[in-house]
Amino acid sequence: MSEPRPVIPVVVWPGSNDDRDAQRALEHLGATAPRVWHTEEMLPRETAAVVLPGGFSYGDYLRCGAIARFSPIVRAVEAFAADGGLVLGICNGFQILTEAGLLPGALRPNASLSFVCRDVTLRVERTDTPFTTRCRTGQELTIPVKHGDGCWFADDALVAALESSGQLVLRYTAGDNPNGAVADVAGVSNADGNVFGLMPHPEHAVDPLLGSVDGASILGSLVDAARLSLAASV
């Protein structure tokens, strides 16, 4: 008997451009991933997790994610997260989650003030999150980035608090920080561990033809966790 396919909707805004990539990657890894337009007020009934994809919602006017965070669907995502639902934000999705207050810190323009698009190496700091169970602690993953505003920022006190609570889940390896992010942070979770954002694009690293399948470790972990959530709800 085949394993159940959890429903993991991918939210779409005007300007999203990685929604179909995320959809295809999730479905390749065993999920059903309908695309949900940002004006919807409810998530699909069987939703087991949600993905906010990369792109340039509303053309990145004001600040990246600053307009998108007011979309009706974000209120549904907030309620879903408050109930313990799994939420993943990739690149622009990460920016939206910080603007909505679902994740700590903020995303600023790259230190170089230039758009960066290349593979980077990440170090996994924790494997006991729903987004990293397929990884090993200290494992290095090769996943591409493509952003102009990916510099994660928090003041020293907040960084220390997040370090202590284990919320800094992914870091760029030494010398491979592409944007000047504080403490080399590439991915951060909320205090409860059910909301996670990262600037690299795991959906672009699930096929050997693209040079790396390391993104499947992140998205596959999410699918596994969503499948467990689905089984628990039956």
Image (cartoon, helix red, strand yellow):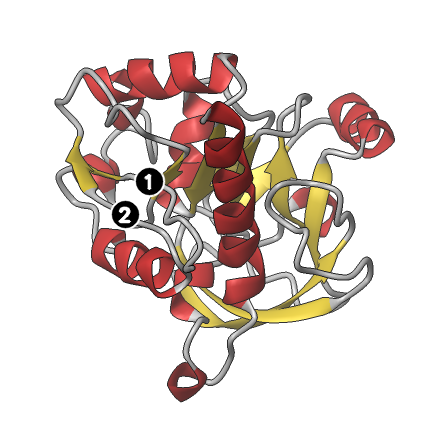
- Secondary structure of the residue carrying numbered label 2: loop
Farthest residue, direction front: 1
Does the residue at mark 1 contact the one at mark 2 (Cβ under 8 Å)? Answer: yes
Callout 2 amino acid: Ala
- Quadrant where the image shows the N terminus: bottom left
Residue 230 at x, y percent in the picture: 46, 34
Residue 152 figure quarter: top right
Callout 1 amino acid: Val
Residue 205 sits above or below residue 196 on the image: below
- Secondary structure of the residue carrying numbered label 1: loop
Residue 43 figure quarter: top left
Along the viewing direction, whichever of 151 and 190 lies nearer the viewer? 190
Residue 58 sits above or below residue 145 on the image: above
Give the residue pinned by disc 2: 33
Which residue is pictured at 70% across the width and 60% down the height? 135
From the viewer's perspective, tell me whether residue 137 is left or right of residue 114: right
- Quadrant where the image shows the C terminus: top left
Give the residue pinned by disc 1: 7
Q: CA distance from mark 1 to mark 2?
A: 6 Å
